Amino acid sequence: MTGSSPQAPVLVLNAGSSSLKYQVVVPESAEVLAGGTVERIGEDGSGVADHAAAVRTVTDQLDAAGVDLARTGLRAVGHRVVHGGPDFSDPVLLDDAVVADIRDLVPLAPLHNPGALAGIEAARDAFADVAQVAVFDTAFFASLPAAAATYAIPKEVSEEHRLRRYGFHGTSHRYVSRAVADLVGRPLESFTQVVLHLGNGCSASAVDGGVAVDTSMGLTPLQGLVMGTRSGDVDPAVFTFLHQQAGMSVADIDTMLNKRSGLKGLAGANDFREVLARADDGDADARLALDVYVHRLRHYVGAYTAVLGGLDVLTFTAGVGENSPVLRAAVVANLGRLGIAVDPARNEARSREARVISPDGSPVTVTVVPTNEELEIARQAAALLERHGG
């Protein structure tokens, strides 16, 4: 599969501990040739014993779909890796040394990086003559100023344990922030923007001239906005209080904050659509959950407007951000003094396309931009190979 053409596709892999999502995409045209998910890896009765078997299943599914990777001249395999730590600020060609470095980062992302490593190792074996590229979710936020990235704890502790604000969903924030420039017809370097990535996981970013200067997630994806099952911001003393007063272990508290909090903890459901429907039916818990969710979003929009010294564009993306006009309207409802508003008809209009939903002439342009992390990974992989003469 060497000697691929400039229009050859990239196989994008997103490997978790028990699943492998894949997509074959042409970076230049954004054409998706095939995609899917292999689930229940390693589970009894699944027939997919490990990630090596999952990669074989991917190739079988691609063959069944009529996608011949050998004939198409596969350009690269692009891997989503959640945590790049303090050293990986750009996509990187995978070799044994880089794989070892990613393995060294497992303590920073014990739930995510092991699955990515398993996928990388399986793909390197299966596609031995194809370039393998790692694209890191944290990379977009490697540019954060020290004032935004630094925790106010003893310096020696931070340095020894690599503690800082890393941020996540960076692949999405990078893709969307660049797509906004195309949508509004302005050079990326010429404006400020806040991007709200709102799905089951939620994050906000402040972007100045295409460069990230702040983000809501921190050392882990737990910090920041209210999410489907994650609490977002809480007083750090919650750990000590619940350990001493409720007898909960650190592991119990961590599980609670990551898996039983957020919308699920407040309303009993982590699906935003279900919470919204319950709130409309008069469920007081669901109404409070939405109010807390929206309050936190407004908090970050206002804070990032101050960080940026003014805001030009506010963008909603990901599942909730792209599909919930009610949520978008609620977030901007009292932000008129900041120049932020939506046009009701534009906001309510259903579309899968990137679009402006603010009134003409608004001081701040409000947009909805569908994210495409697979395309961004493919483009970054292709660009890296081009720089290396591949």
Image (cartoon, rainbow, N blue to C red):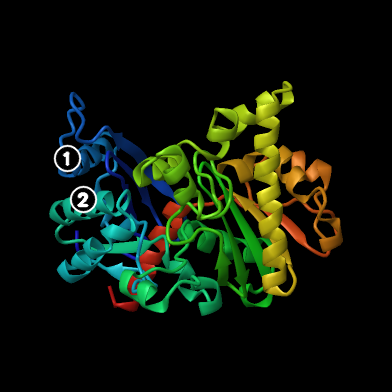
Q: Using the image, determine if residue 33 lies above or below residue 98.
A: above
300 relative to 41 in the view: left or right: right
Q: Furthest residue to the front?
A: 245
Q: Using the image, determine if residue 149 lies above or below residue 313.
A: below
Q: Using the image, determine if residue 332 lies above or below residue 86.
A: above
Residue at the spot x=54%, y=50% of the render? 232
Depth check: 42 or 236 in front? 236
**The disc label shown at residue 212, or none:** none
- Dot 2: few (<14), some (14–19), or many (≥20) neighbours within 10 Å? some
Q: What residue type is labelled 1?
A: Asp
Image quarter hosting the C terminus: bottom left
Q: Name the residue under label 2.
A: 118
Image quarter hosting the N terminus: bottom left
> In this view of the protein, can residue 107 be seen by the observer?
yes
Whole-percent x, y for residue 260 in the image: 47, 36
Depth check: 113 or 122 in front? 113
Residue at the spot x=19%, y=43% of the render? 51
Under circle 1, the secondary element is: loop
Whole-percent x, y for residue 300 in the image: 66, 58
Q: What residue type is labelled 2?
A: Ala
Whole-percent x, y for residue 366 in the image: 74, 56
- Dot 1: few (<14), some (14–19), or many (≥20) neighbours within 10 Å? some
Q: Name the residue under label 1.
A: 50
The reply to whether the C-beta atoms of the residues labelled 2 and 1 are less than 8 Å apart is: yes
Residue at the spot x=60%, y=27% of the render? 274
